[in-house]
Image (cartoon, helix red, strand yellow):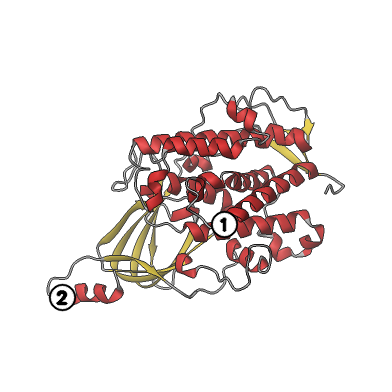
Amino acid sequence: MRLEQLLDVVECSKPKAINSLDNPQPVDSFSPQKFNSGELAWGQGLGQEYYRRDKNIPFMDLRWGLASTGDTTHNYHLDANGFASFVCVDTGAKLWILATPKKGREAEAFASIHLFTGEYSPDRPNTELWDFEAILLLPSMMLVMRPNTPHFVITITACIARGAHFYCTYTIRDSIFGFYHTLIAKSVTNADHAHASRELLCRLLTLYDTYLTDPSEQRNTPVMAHIPDLSTFDGFVDLMVLCNWFEFLNVLCPWGYSEKLGTVTERYRAIRLRAVARRLLEWAFNNYDFEVEGIDSTVHEDIIPTQTISGLEAATAIHHPFLAQQAHALICYKKTACQSDLGNVQVEDYDVLITPERFEKAMQGCLQNHAAEPIFATYRLEQNTLAYVGRRFNVLRRVYHVE
């Protein structure tokens, strides 16, 4: 609804409660935010391969306005494509209700593939799935919301607000989980910014590759705050989650289902960046040693790592089972979502092509000839999560640099 139409409805003799959510903004009305890794990566990548200097940040997808009368609601949903968000109220008041993992559950509870396929309903509190906290937003206040957060919004008094979507390295794992949720269980979101999402994630991978593998670049301390911390195992998991997304790109994008969809440039870039992701992980496993923290039965039983591992042995013990696990989880998620009608919503014309059978076939094609293919082919553990469930390690940086 256009703002002029909103005013007409409000000023008529019998005004109605109206919530106008689709108001994209062509320019950025916010000052630069230090936590916005995606836009920093955009600037850092200008002029590199596939990143033309004359291509601007897609603000029409990333900046938006909200206008609503009082006593309106926006039911539970996730922001699209795994984006984190911040919102600033200019006038009026909104009550922002955020879902939080239940006490005693792990922080990655929202990585479950059954989060939205069971008892979930967008119209009720869903207290059996999560706890929640409510934040009252008044003029001049800004809320920064992490990605993959179900939320419910109540407009208390007539309100105008501005907001933005972004990616942050610190929450990139949650962003990818949120991307999978909104891709497969389409009805849990209210928008789709797939092109902008791909553009930003591609630039993030390029940024990580540049600043992790080139020691001369690591003197740039402000940029290093946006690079995964590989001195921790959680940092390695963050990197693996993003690199796995590039492995699955032909499953996640429409060109994997029809030769008529997607441009030649997009396809070539996908091939190029999949190679970058593999090379980056190879570099990471070659430059760090991994000490076993403890025994975990969820590790693929055919892989018994030694006390300290690195290189191909580490990749085989850590990354390959995780890649196979996520691939199986996504296939299971697609089937379950379609059975529950969550995944049958058609946002684009090509959505009808992405059946569970074709989705699984595309996933098999992605892993064909990959070192993880044998594990994927014989995978026996039914995983209900997209989160890493394997053995954890202490990470030690090698004293010498391996190219």
Judge whether residue 142 can be spotted in this image: no
Locate residue 13, reporting x and y percent: 12, 75
At 29% from the left and 46% from the top, the residue drawn is 124
Q: Nearer the viewer, residue 289 or 293?
A: 289
Crowding at dot 1, Cα within 10 Å, few <14 / some 14-19 / many 20+, comes out as: few
**Mark earlier in primary sequence (1, 2):** 2
Which residue has dot 2 on it?
A: 12
Disc 1, disc 2: CB below 8 Å?
no
Query: In the image, 156: left or right of 212?
Result: left
Q: How far apart are marks 1 and 2 (CA)?
A: 51 Å
At 54% from the left and 56% from the top, the residue drawn is 198
Query: In the image, 356: left or right of 206?
Result: left
On the image, which quarter does residue 226 sit in?
Answer: bottom right
At 59% from the left and 27% from the top, the residue drawn is 377
Locate residue 238, reporting x and y percent: 62, 47
Judge whether residue 48 can be spotted in this image: yes
Q: Could you say which disc has been placed on residue 264 in the image?
A: 1
Crowding at dot 2, Cα within 10 Å, few <14 / some 14-19 / many 20+, comes out as: few
Query: In the image, 132: left or right of 395?
Result: left
Locate residue 215, reporting x and y percent: 81, 57
Q: Nearer the viewer, residue 318 or 361?
A: 361
At 52% from the left and 44% from the top, the residue drawn is 251
